[in-house]
Structure formats: C-alpha cells, structure tokens
Amino acid sequence: MNIDDELRGTMQRHADDAPSAAGMLDAVRVRSRRYERGRQAGLVGVVVLAGVAVTAGTPYALGEFRHPGPAPAFPVGQPPISTPTHAPASPSRSARPARQSTVALTPGFTPLAFPLTPTVTLPGLDAPTVGRAVGEVRLVYNGQSAGLIVRVVEQLPQGDFTPASTQPSTVGGRPATLTTGTDTDGPAARLTWQLPDGRWVDVRGTGSIGPTQVHQYAEGLRVQQLPPPALPFKLTLAPQGFQVAFQEIDPTEFHLCLAPAADVNDEGPSWVCLSGGANGLQSGGDPVQVGPDPGQIDYGTDNVTLTVLRPGFTFTVIEGLNGPLNEDDLIRYAASIDKG
C-alpha cells in the first residue's frame, strides 16, 4: 500500500472525529450576522469564503451564548435538520497550477486581548472567554442560570435589544444608561456608557444577573488591558502582520479567523480560519501529510479546506480558493498548530 492509500484509509476510519469545514465557516457567518444584526452590508465576504453552495447550518447548536448542562440562561438555537450540500469541486489538487503565497509565515502570534479589566466576580458565572466579531470585542461569561456579556464597540448596537424601562445612571462618574428589556436571548438588564476615548461599553446580564449585579460589575471595570486568557490551541506560526478578525471559544469548540489589519472589519478571501471541536468530515478530497499527522485537502469552488487528524486534537483550516497561503504554506501553517 502506498502513502496515499494509507492516508486515505486513516481519514476514512476517523471521519467522525474531524471538525466540519462547512460548519466552521457557517458558524462564523451565523455568529457574525447575529452580533451585527443591524448592519446593512451583510457578510458577503464570509459567505463567499464559506461557499454559496453551503445551504445548511452547522452540526451543533448555535446561539449568542452556549451553556453546558440543563436550563441555560441564554437559550441556544436549534441545529438544522438538513445536511450540508456542496457545489461541484474545482480542479483537484494534482491539476491545480502552483502559485506563490502572498504573505510569509512567521513565528509569533498576538492573542486577542480585552481592553478592560474586571475587578468584580459575580456568582454563578464561569470564567470568561474573549471574543471578537465585526465591530466589537467582547467578554462572555456563561453560567447554569445566568449569563453576562461585555461589549466594547465603536457604535452601540440597537437592533438586538428592546427596552422596557430606562433610567439614567453613572459608571465611574461618567453618565450611563440603565435599561431593562429583552434581547435576542430573552429578558435582560443593560448598562451602557462611553469611555473617554469615545468607545462604548455595553454590559448585559440575564437570568440571575439583574440591574443591581450589572451595575456592580460595571463599576468594577478598569480601563486597562486584560491579559489574554489561555486558548485551546497554540499557533507556532502565523501569517505575518495578520490579526484576530473573528474569535469565539466555548467549552466544546472554537473558531478563529486571522486577517490583515486592513481587512479585520471587512470579511473576505484574505481571511484564514481555524476551527476545532465539531464533528463531521467532508467527503472527497486528497490525502496529504501534515507534519506527523494524516490530513485531507479539498478544493471547492470558493475555498480550500485542510482537515488535520492529530491524535486527541482534530481541526480544520480554511481560506479562500486563491487565499494568502499556497498549499505548501497552508499545510505548514496547520502543522504548526497544536493543542493549548
């Protein structure tokens, strides 16, 4: 048996272990659209990168907050019941002409850091995770019967919150607005105010986190960068100059997209995305070796998908069909990724 046969057999035996590439980019699209519900432009770039033929959602529940265990404070969305479909593939790996990368891979990755540091810990919440969607950086706390999300944004989002009562307040001596009402996940308390540099802070609680707890937490925020928390992955190499454009981490999966600074707020084919934790392997593709591990590379009509079956840590890397990394560098990038 030759090496291709061995790799293909390994991929087939472990197909259920690998994250779904279609699910990964669909998750980025759905999450970004939810957080940017009020934006008029939509997420054309991410949809193109994911492939317009992906007509179904992810193989896991999607929601603004994810909670292990029963009775989540923020109800999650239901997974779609249909299965992903894929457009006819573009020419296979062997038929594609060689091309050059447009960016070098270099050591050093700068993790996403939240610009505020909390000093108050509210009961019933797990340790927070740091995330980013277009236009905002956020700190997300999950709990069995409570939840809290802290956004730092250039402009306050309006479309995802329906106020019921509003009253003036203060945070750190600065004017603030305390509102109760509902957002996309049910009843919520919301406190908003503006930082000296003009950015807005939006703190929202639900479940047992009511107006009093939200205000208590907000008063404990300090305008200093929070040291980046531990991540479930390590990047030994990264595209030079790329920054975190999208990040979401929860107890069961993660999504990370890197992009040039100029494209961080403009989703498109320059993005290079990484996902882990979901199940399902796309059919087809060519077996490749990714460092010591078996892998599979798929060329779709709009994107390149590289799936890596590392023991105990399976993941997928996706970029646009003519993205910043050629095949050799995409494989080298994936080989440098390890479990955190």
Image (cartoon, rainbow, N blue to C red):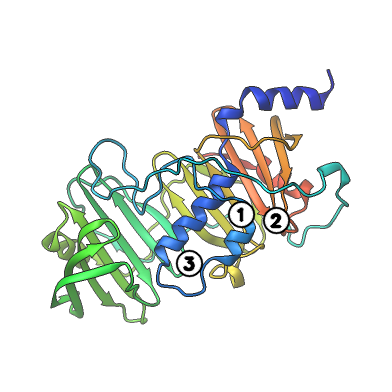
State the residue position of label 1: 50
Amino acid type of the residue tagged 1 in the rendering = Ala
Foreground mark, 1 or 3, reads 1
State the SS at label 2: loop
Q: Are marks 2 and 1 in contact (CB under 8 Å)?
A: yes
The quarter of the image holding the N terminus is: top right
User: Where residue 257 sits: x, y (%)?
Assistant: 56, 56
Q: Is residue 115 above or below residue 82?
A: below
* CA gap, disc 2 and disc 1: 7 Å
Q: Badge 1 local density, few (<14 within 10 Å), some, or many (20+)?
A: many
* CA gap, disc 1 and disc 3: 17 Å
Q: Earlier in the sequence, mark 2 or mark 3?
A: 3
Q: Earlier in the sequence, mark 2 or mark 1?
A: 1
User: Where residue 308 sits: x, y (%)?
Assistant: 64, 36
State the SS at label 3: loop
Q: Earlier in the sequence, mark 1 or mark 3?
A: 1
Q: Is residue 333 left or right of residue 275?
A: right
State the residue position of label 3: 134
